[in-house]
Image (cartoon, grey):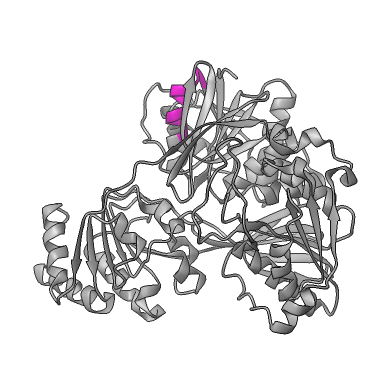
Amino acid sequence: MNVAVCVKQIPDPANPGKLDPATRTLVREGKLIMDDSDSYGVEMALQLVDKAGGGEVTLVSMAPNDEVSGLRNGLAMGAHKGVLVSDPALLGTDALGTAKVLAAAIRRNEFDLVLCATESTDGYTGTFPVQLAELLGLPSITFAKRVDIAGATVKVERQTEAGYDEVEAPLPAVVTVTAGVVEPRYPSFKGIMAAKSKPVDVLKVSDLGLDAGAVGQGGSRQEIVSVEAAEARSAGEIVEDEGDAHERIVAFLEQLKVI
Amino acid sequence: MALSTIWVVAEAAEGKALPVTLELLTKARELAGTVEAVAWGTDTAAVAPTLGAHGAAKVHDLGDLGGSLPGVPVAAAIAGAVAGGGGPDAILVPHTYDGRDIAGRLSAKLDKPVLTNATDLRIDGDTLVVGSAIFGGSTLLDTVFTGSGPAIVCVKPKSFAPAEGGAGAGEITALAVPGSGATDTSKITSRHVEERSGPKLDEADVVVSGGRGLGEAGNYQLIEELAKLLKGAPGASRAIVDAGWVPYAYQVGQTGKTVKPAIYLAAGISGATQHLVGMKGAKTIIAVNKDKEAPIFSVADLGIVGDVHKVLPKLIEALKARG
């Protein structure tokens, strides 16, 4: 069983995000890491390939500047190889453009399953996986909290507002996994060393037969016309508990006429 | 692009329109002269009068989807209408599980961009301006579409207040669902409803949420008890949902529910931006956390630096004593 996992390389989310004042695109400087949300898909893929008794996990990613450090995180977990589409023309590409690029990259090989996170941590648009599925002509099941393969069918417990649905689709299919679907493994030292020599195929937009106009800021057909800081909520009173803090809460609730 | 007609993807559950559907219809009335809804399932006749009362002149009914996840067939129906020349200038979609599937599929089918996480919509001249918040709500963006329509926008629940008025007829007309081949093969085989009592999380006036600071899953009962005493709904941070302490449906935050209650009480929640974006619209925030540097205190009206294991039981006793 061969599984492709779409991964995003992002700046460390512990640092506050920034927009480039000129291009109004996300600033991606410093070392990039694999989005934590993607570690669940990588782990799921490794487990499914293991259960199937063989196959490969391929990480598929896109970046403007040859960044591979985030891909190495997933390779260190055990993924077999990576495909990186890297091209300065990709700067400012939106979700649909990203789907076009990664669909073209994924089509170069045959996969039984494509896994993605439900949304990225930095941009959180959350539409890319389904756009990708549509471009690949595949069924999709989003918000999986459990994934099993039974023959040529993927069976998923899909999160809903009220609980969950059991949903199935024939393979190949695109599935998005929620955080918590599996416990991602920590890369071992051996894994980290091995990741350095695992193959990463680096492609340009032109290698994919895509028109450069379909990607990048121009291809996004949207423009940010204003950026401003949200009105900050001011902090109120902070009290150290001396054993009677519950009384403060009761008094506060009384004042608000909740009780 | 000027807007004369807006379609609202009218999600419903258990025979009732979702609140976000009514919020979007209400806003759409302000933005365009003609507002229509797109509905599916077996309850459209029951839902249509409410959709009409909130402004839908027509309800395009797709009928029963035969167990398909809605993403592909609903997008195919709308794309079919657009291709036939009878489509709208903009399509507003709830930012929900199914809504994002529909918007993503539709975007790829029409080869049009989709803007998500919208919290504001307005017309400037004859241009639709889409407001959204990024970086955990600390930065506000206005974005416009620069190409031809239709515009596709996913709007977060609770962005607008629903109101009846400008009553539309809510007239039901059938809209064909073109076949979608292999893409429309994701089928729901069974549904599971996780029962919960009390008010719904996203509709409650009081929300009491717990986080990792509770220490262990068993302590979540303190949150449930407190929520019950305050006639509110229990919620949770992503950390304890990921850890499997409570179901996903309890999650407040970017990947969970957006809540705007009168009172939000956060216990043992540090306040990651992921969480703050889902609750900082609350009118009043009370936080209990033992780390005085926790970011939750930067938004709290009353912050208690203390141990939830000590403060919550005493608070519960005090509320019980009041009867």
Q: Is residue A244 left or right of residue B169?
A: left
Work out whether residue A37 or residue B104 is closer to the camera in this orientation and state it: A37
Please tell me whether the stretch drawn in magenta is mainly helix, strand or loop: helix
Can the viewer see residue B22?
Answer: no
What residue range appears in magenta? B24-34
Q: Position of residue B31 (x, y in %)?
A: 47, 22
Question: Is residue B317 placed above or below A116 in the rendered structure?
Answer: below
Work out whether residue B140 or residue B87 is closer to the camera in this orientation and state it: B140
Question: Is residue A222 placed above or below B196 in the rendered structure?
Answer: above
State which quadrant residue B3 falls in.
top right
Residue at the front extreme, as displayed: A30
Q: Is residue A242 left or right of residue A220?
A: left
Work out whether residue B273 or residue A16 is closer to the camera in this orientation and state it: A16
Work out whether residue B251 or residue A241 is closer to the camera in this orientation and state it: A241
Q: Position of residue A211 (x, y in %)?
A: 84, 36
Picture residue at 11% right of the left edge, 61% below the top: A251
**Residue A106 covered by magenta stretch:** no
Q: Is residue A236 left or right of residue B294?
A: left
Position of the N terminus of chain B, as image quadrant, is top right
Can the viewer see residue A202?
Answer: yes
Q: Position of residue B282 (x, y in %)?
A: 31, 49
Position of the C terminus of chain B, as image quadrant, is bottom left
Question: Is residue B229 placed above or below B60 in the rendered structure?
Answer: below
